[in-house]
Amino acid sequence: MIDANYQDHYLPPWAASKGKYPYMTLLAQLSTKDGRTCGNAVVVAIAPEREGISAHAIVLTDAGNLMNLTPNEMEEYFHPVEYIQLRVVLEDRIDDLVIALNDLFIDFKQIHAVWNALPDAFEERPAVKATLAMLKKCGMGNEYT
C-alpha cells in the first residue's frame, strides 16, 4: 500500500526536486492545462524585465518548439510548477533540437538548390524569407543569403 508520505517524497526519474515553485524558475517542468494549445514544456532561459519589456521565459516544449512567454501567459497555459527537471534530461532534449536544426539546414540546402534552378517559383514567399532569416540568425545559411 502506498501512503501519502511516499507520494510526497517520490521523484520521477527526470526530476531534480519537488515542491511549489514560481513559473519563472529555470528548469521548471511545465505541465500543460490544454494539450490542444501546447504540450508540456521546460523553462530553458529567463529574461528579466528591462527598458519597458516585461520579464519573460523561453520554454522548450516536448515537441521541440521554443516559446517566449510572460509569467501571465505561463499561468494561462500551464498548471502550477511542482517539479524542477534534471539538467541532464534538458541537455538530451537540446541535443535532439540541434539534430532537428541540422535536418532543417539540410532541407534548406535542397530548397536553395531548387531556388537557384527556378528562382521565379519562390518570388516573394513569406515562409521562405522567414526561414532564411531564422537560419541567418542561427549562423546557418550565411552563404546563401
Image (cartoon, rainbow, N blue to C red):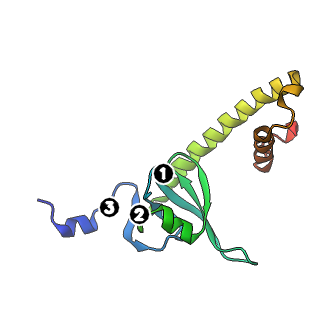
Asked whether the beta carbons under mark 1 and mark 2 sit within 8 Å of each other, the answer is no
| Nearer the observer, 30 or 141 | 30
Mark 3 to mark 2: distance in Å?
Answer: 8 Å
N-term-proximal mark, 1 vs 2: 2
N-term-proximal mark, 3 vs 2: 3
Asked whether the beta carbons under mark 3 and mark 2 sit within 8 Å of each other, the answer is yes
The picture places residue 46, in percent across and down from the top left corner, at 61, 68
Circle 3 is placed at which residue position? 11
Mark 1 to mark 3: distance in Å?
Answer: 21 Å
Height in image: 109 above or below 75?
A: above
N-term-proximal mark, 1 vs 3: 3
Residue at 48 percent of width and 74 percent of height:
22
Circle 2 is placed at which residue position? 16
For the residue labelled by badge 2, is the local secondary structure a helix, a strand or a loop?
Answer: strand
Height in image: 99 above or below 91?
A: above
Residue at 78 percent of width and 38 percent of height:
128
Please name the amino acid that badge 1 sits on.
Answer: Gly
Look at discs 1 and 3 and give the one toward the viewer: 1
Circle 1 is placed at which residue position? 39
For the residue labelled by badge 1, is the local secondary structure a helix, a strand or a loop?
Answer: loop
To which quarter of the image does residue 132 belong?
Answer: top right
| Nearer the observer, 57 or 3 | 57
**Image quadrant for the N terminus?**
bottom left
Residue at 52 percent of width and 65 percent of height:
74
Residue at 52 percent of width and 45 percent of height:
63
Side (left or right) of 51 relative to 13 = right
